[in-house]
Image: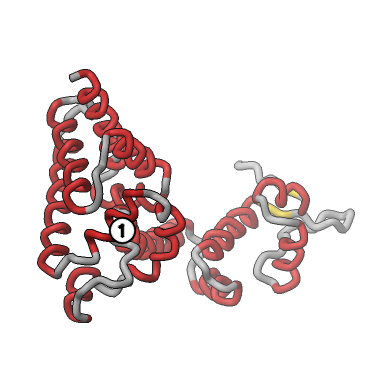
């Protein structure tokens, strides 16, 4: 028979990172109460209570209020696979939205334009329901004091709808060929991957600012280090962010050796 462990409120707090006060609150409102009460009167949490706490924390992380979390847990069967499927769908929905944001931020200044000269219809065609100006402040804080920011800002404010469509088409094509190379087992430091990394660098240089190899290496590190950028590439193909980062580094080494 499988052993069922029990835990004090302090142990659960240490295991989960949730404060004792929060656990007491969950108990008071009835969303999570210790399931075992030994003779000494000190109630203990069981393994199933920890499973429920993990579900609560997940839904809270996605922004659900406690009242709605309680309803979700009551309505769903006590089956891990049910929650996993629901959580997978919710995460995919969030990733889909973040991907639209990340794709713009990744292009450095695509996320910062408040004066894009497009009609509302053209803007929707290019960006969908994402509004680049909503992220202008973040982009300016991150890159505003750089020559690259200023140069990119100068260029993109002149772009027409056709320009944006061409830019996106080229970017999508590079991403597609990177994913194909990764899927075919190409080495990140092989000629094919390095050539694609160079094409990626030149795409940035053409459309935004002069992207030297040092800057490009920094961008590659950001694709892996920043979850928003990583999510965008992982949506295209698993491990693509790291593959591109490694190809960028290899391409920079090739350029230095030439």
* Residue 160 percent coordinates (x, y): 14, 69
Residue at figure coordinates x 17%, y 65% from the top left? 159
* Residue 75 percent coordinates (x, y): 50, 74
Dot 1 corresponds to which residue? 109
Judge by depth and name the residue closer to the eye, 172 or 180: 172
Which residue ends up furthest to the right in the rendered image?
Answer: 40
Judge by depth and name the residue closer to the eye, 9 or 2: 9
Which quadrant of the figure contains the N terminus?
top right
Q: Is residue 92 visible?
A: no
Q: Is residue 246 visible?
A: yes
Toward which corner of the image does residue 33 lie, by quadrant?
bottom right
Residue at figure coordinates x 64%, y 50% from the top left? 47
Residue at figure coordinates x 20%, y 27% from the top left? 187
Image vertical order of residue 129 relative to residue 19, above or below: below
Image vertical order of residue 24 relative to residue 119, above or below: above
Residue at figure coordinates x 70%, y 67% from the top left? 26
Image vertical order of residue 25 relative to residue 257, above or below: below
């Amino acid at each position: 028979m499988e052993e069922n462990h029990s835990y004090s409120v302090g142990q659960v707090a240490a295991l989960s990172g949730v404060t004792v006060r929060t656990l007491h609150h969950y108990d008071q409102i009835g969303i999570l109460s210790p399931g075992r009460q030994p003779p000494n009167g000190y109630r203990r949490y069981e393994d199933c209570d920890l499973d429920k706490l993990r579900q609560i924390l997940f839904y809270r992380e996605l922004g659900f209020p406690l009242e709605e979390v309680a309803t979700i847990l009551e309505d769903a069967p006590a089956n891990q696979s049910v929650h996993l499927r629901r959580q997978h769908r919710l995460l995919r929905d969030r990733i889909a939205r973040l991907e639209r944001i990340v794709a713009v931020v990744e292009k450095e200044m695509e996320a910062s334009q408040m004066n894009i000269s497009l009609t509302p219809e053209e803007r929707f065609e290019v960006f969908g329901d994402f509004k680049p100006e909503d992220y202008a402040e973040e982009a300016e804080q991150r890159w505003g004091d750089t020559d690259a920011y200023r140069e990119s800002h100068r260029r993109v404010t002149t772009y027409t709808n056709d320009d944006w469509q061409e830019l996106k088409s080229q970017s999508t094509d590079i991403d597609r060929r990177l994913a194909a190379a990764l899927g075919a087992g190409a080495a990140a430091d092989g000629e094919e991957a390095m050539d694609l990394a160079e094409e990626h660098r030149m795409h940035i240089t053409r459309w935004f600012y002069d992207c030297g190899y040092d800057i490009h290496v920094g961008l590659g590190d950001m694709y892996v280090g920043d979850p928003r950028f990583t999510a965008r590439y992982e949506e295209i193909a698993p491990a693509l962010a790291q593959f591109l980062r490694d190809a960028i580094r290899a391409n920079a080494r090739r350029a230095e050796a030439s």
